[in-house]
Amino acid sequence: MQSALDGLWAQIVEVHNEAKTLFLLGEELDRDQFRDFIQPINEHRHSLEHIVRAQANSLGLDPDGKKDEQYQCDSLRKALGHEYRAFFDCADWIGIILREDIEETLRPYGASSIHAVLPEYYPDLRPRIQEISESIAQKRGDKNVSKDGQITDDVRGYKAILDELRDIHRQITRVQGALEDHQSRTRREGGRKWMLSVLGALVAGGIIALAGVVLGRRTEATPPSRTLPPEQEAPADSASAPPQG
């Protein structure tokens, strides 16, 4: 029984520390909303209640003074279940925050800038983010507080997924300045090209207009050609008519 108690204590400590790490990370990533996310706090409070009950019994502090290791195990299992839920609450929120922040970071930039600055994003990182989202959904669906023998495995697996997502998030955050510079250069170059095209169109239009004016003046300066009327011939019947009287 003591080995079972020791194992439960070890799991509680591990899961609690991972949940606490994610909770603190959430406070830093999303100060405005995460501070109102009370569900993990409630789970930790309930966990503490069961831990105190188990420890009080272990120390003989219950009213009857009897020690019951089975009661202690049951209480610690309940505490572990609450720590497990607290971890999942924090992990789910962190996964949402990171993916939304990645999307918000990249949204202002065009595909050409993203490809130029972070060429691995479209072929590698973006598909991997989609795979991570599917893995998170699978983890959430498989959550089962009653399988205490697999709780730490679930926590470690979910943590590994979030660690990879955090690495991708850091990669994208690091190049945000470079993305801004590239897009600014692209816009300036596009503006210059547009100005040159406008100037070219204006110059071409001016040349065409000038050519039209010159040709018009030449046409006005050229005297019109005159065509002499043909000689008039007398009608045939009047030439053959005999003279009168």
Image: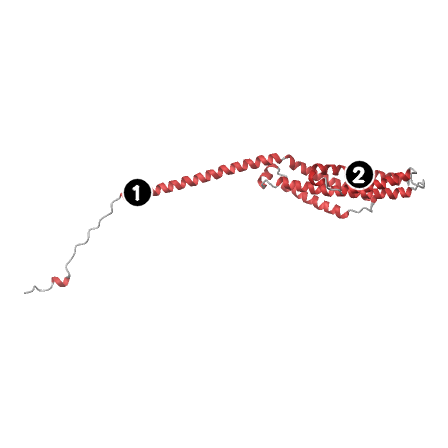
Secondary structure state at the residue bearing disc 2: helix
Residue ID for mark 2: 16
Residue ID for mark 1: 217
Contact (Cβ within 8 Å) of mark 1 with mark 2: no
Asked whether, in this view, residue 125 is left or right of residue 52, the answer is left
Please identify the residue farthest to the front as the structure is shown: 63
In the depicted view, which residue is nearer to us: 235 or 38? 38
Q: Quadrant of the N terminus?
A: top right
Observer-side mark, 1 or 2, equals 2
Residue 109 placement (x, y as % from top left): 59, 40
Q: Quadrant of the C terminus?
A: bottom left
* Image disc number at residue 89: none
Q: Could you say which quadrant of the image residue 63 lies in? A: top right
Along the polypeptide, which appears first: circle 1 or circle 2?
A: 2
Q: Residue at x 72, y 45 (%)?
A: 136
Crowding at dot 2, Cα within 10 Å, few <14 / some 14-19 / many 20+, comes out as many
Q: Residue at x 62, y 40 (%)?
A: 106
Crowding at dot 1, Cα within 10 Å, few <14 / some 14-19 / many 20+, comes out as few
Secondary structure state at the residue bearing disc 1: helix
Residue 11 placement (x, y as % from top left): 83, 39
For the question of whether residue 124 can be seen, the reply is no
Q: Could you say which quadrant of the image residue 155 lies in? A: top right
For the question of whether residue 136 can be seen, the reply is yes
Residue 100 placement (x, y as % from top left): 66, 42
